[in-house]
Amino acid sequence: MPISRVTKLYSVQDAKIAALTADPAGGTATYDAVIDVPGIQEMSISGDVEVKTLRGDNKKLASNATISNIQVSVTHAKLSLDVLEAILGGTVTDSGTTPSQKSIWDLTGDTATLPPFKLEGVTPPNGVDIVGGDLHWVLHKLTLSAFPDLGFANEDYRVVSFTADADPLLSNDKWISAVLNETAVEIA
C-alpha cells in the first residue's frame, strides 16, 4: 500500500541550489555540485494563473485557465558568495595567506549572466505526518526575477533573500516537484 499523499508541512531544515549546466530537449538535465543556502529561513512558492473567458449571447459560455508563472521566494540568514555566483553570475576569487586571506565576489557587466539553477528545500525529519519522513520541494529550472535583497541593517542582523521564476525543463517539461519520503533523505 502506498504512503498517504496528505501531510502537514512543518518548517524548513535545509535548502541547496545547483547551477543548471545542460538541458537538452529529449535528453537529461545536468547540474553542477549543490551549494548550501546557509541559514534557510523560508521558501515560499506561488504561481500565476491566466484565465480566458468566452462570452456570447449576453452570458459566459466557457473559460479556460493556464499556469503562466511559478515563483519562489527564499529568505536565508547568512550571505554566501557561492550562492550569489550561482544565481546572479559573477566570479568568486580567493587570495592571500593567513592572516590576510580574502574571498571576493565581483559582478561585472560581462559576468552578470543570471544563470538558470535548481533549488531544493526539505522539511526536517518528522516535519510531515509520516514518522521519520520528510518532504522535498524541487524547482528544476529557475532564473532570478529581481535582484537579491542584500546589504546591512542598523544594530540588527541582515538576512538575505531572493525571488526567482520557474521555467519548464526542455528535457522533461518539469517545473516543480513535491517529493514525500517515507524515510527522510538529505538533499543530494
Image: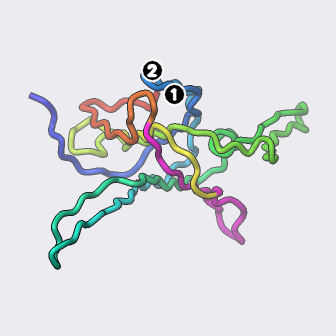
Q: Position of residue 88 (x, y in %)?
A: 67, 46
Find residue 185 and report its image quarter: top left
Q: Nearer the viewer, residue 91 or 79?
A: 91
Check disc 2 and report the residue beneath it: 27
Q: Secondary structure at mark 1?
A: loop
Q: Is residue 156 above or below residue 77?
A: below
In this view, the residue in front, 188 or 112, is 112
Q: Are marks 1 and 2 in contact (CB under 8 Å)?
A: yes
Inter-mark Cα distance, 1 to 2: 7 Å
| Left or right relative to 137: residue 56 | left
Total residue callouts: 2
The residue range painted magenta reads 147-168
Compare residues 166 and 35 and report the one nearer the observer: 166
Tag 1: Cα neighbours inside 10 Å, few (<14), some, or many (≥20)? some
Q: Quadrant of residue 63?
A: bottom left
Identified by mark 2, the residue type is Gly
**In the image, residue 148 lies at what x, y percent?**
64, 56
What residue is disc 1 on?
A: 23
Which amino acid type is shown beneath numbered disc 1?
Asp
Image point 16% across, 34% down: which residue? 3
